[in-house]
Image (cartoon, rainbow, N blue to C red):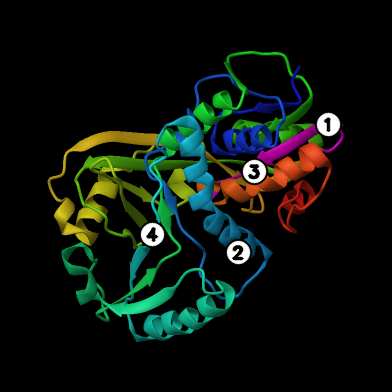
Amino acid sequence: MIDVTVMGGGVFGLSIAYVCARRGARVCVVEKRALASGASGGPLGALAPHVPDNWNEKKEFQFRSLIMAEQFWREAEQISGLSSGFRRGGRLQPIADQRALELARVRSGSARSNWRGRADWDVLPTCNFAEWCPASGTGYVIFDTLSARLQPKSACLCLAGAIRELGGQIRLGEALVKGQVVWATGYEGLQDLSEDIGRTAGDGTRGQAVSLRHDAGDVPQLFAGGLHIVPHADGTVAVGSIDAGGSDSLHSSSSRAETLLERATEICPSLRGAPVLARWAGVRPRAKSRAPILGPWPGRDGHFVANGGFKIGFGVAPGVAEVMADLVLDGRDRVPSGFRVEDSIG
């Protein structure tokens, strides 16, 4: 007997199945290709917050998810015996000019209020961080202690291992759908949802990243010029861009790997000459609203949607899993405003 079938073996699907299994449900994850074969299989793994001012429900949800993350991943590691690569090491962002410096200091106060003492957003001199620190026009950087990192594919395999240890099933290929059904099927799932409801809920946008052999040690991740540079525990550094649209659109075939490398070495010269281990390109599911889509699938009793992680999927996964488990198992609706299907289609 299956209580919950989760369609999709990316971070949303596996996280939801894991939390449902921890609550005693009999779960089955169905993935038609391979675990973490889509957007969840990239090397980047940057778990970073939005800026702490202009607070809203989306930022609150992301904040709570990032706070939950350490316990969430540590417990999954303990159950599975596998590493997720999680570490809360913080993030550095250079401050370009005086106006940006003043804004960063204002946001430091917003963080004290909105992050409620759980993490800091500090403005510090670059000399505090030695050669790993990116160049800054003001000589100052933002250092937030909320940002974390993990290794995406390892994290997905960690969740899959925990699900199996809890008595759940992982099936690759086609399988019968039983019980309550959660659709966490990436950009293709957004296309299916859009076709079913006759309105655009979302689509995909291309993302690219590279993995370099460079042991940076336990240093913060960097965010500069729209580029994430994330050091990992296995002696690698992942580089990826937040750019979307234009040549990153779903139907574009252009490659930006070499551009990523050039920009990364300009920001962080210590990466110059680091061997390239892998180049990754994939399609990230982006809802029309840019926020995740969570909740009942309109017109399909017992079917639910969990999709649209886009740039923040791994960061919000713990919160998404708890909210969806509440909804699917107990009928308790805690989906935030702005995250519902109707919010995405407008």
How crowded is the residue under tag 1: few (<14 C-alpha within 10 Å), some, or many (20+)?
few
Residues at marks 4 and 3, CA–CA distance in whole angstroms: 28 Å
State the image coordinates of residue 101 (x, y, percent, origin top left).
37, 83
Query: Mark 2 or mark 4: which comes first in sequence?
Result: 2
Q: Residue at x 34, y 39 (%)?
A: 255
Magenta span includes 303:
yes
- Quarter holding residue 252: top left
Residues at marks 2 and 4, CA–CA distance in whole angstroms: 19 Å
State the image coordinates of residue 331 (x, y, percent, origin top left).
84, 42
Magenta span includes 206:
no
Chain part drawn in magenta: 298-312
The residue at which mark 3 appears reads as 321
Residue 59: which numbered mark, if any?
A: 2
Query: Mark 4 or mark 3: which comes first in sequence?
Result: 4
Of circles 1 and 3, the one toward us is: 3
Q: Residue at x 36, y 54 (%)?
A: 228
Tag 1, which secondary structure?
loop
Query: Mark 2 or mark 3: which comes first in sequence?
Result: 2
The residue at which mark 4 appears reads as 226
Quadrant showing the C terminus: bottom right
Tag 3, which secondary structure?
helix
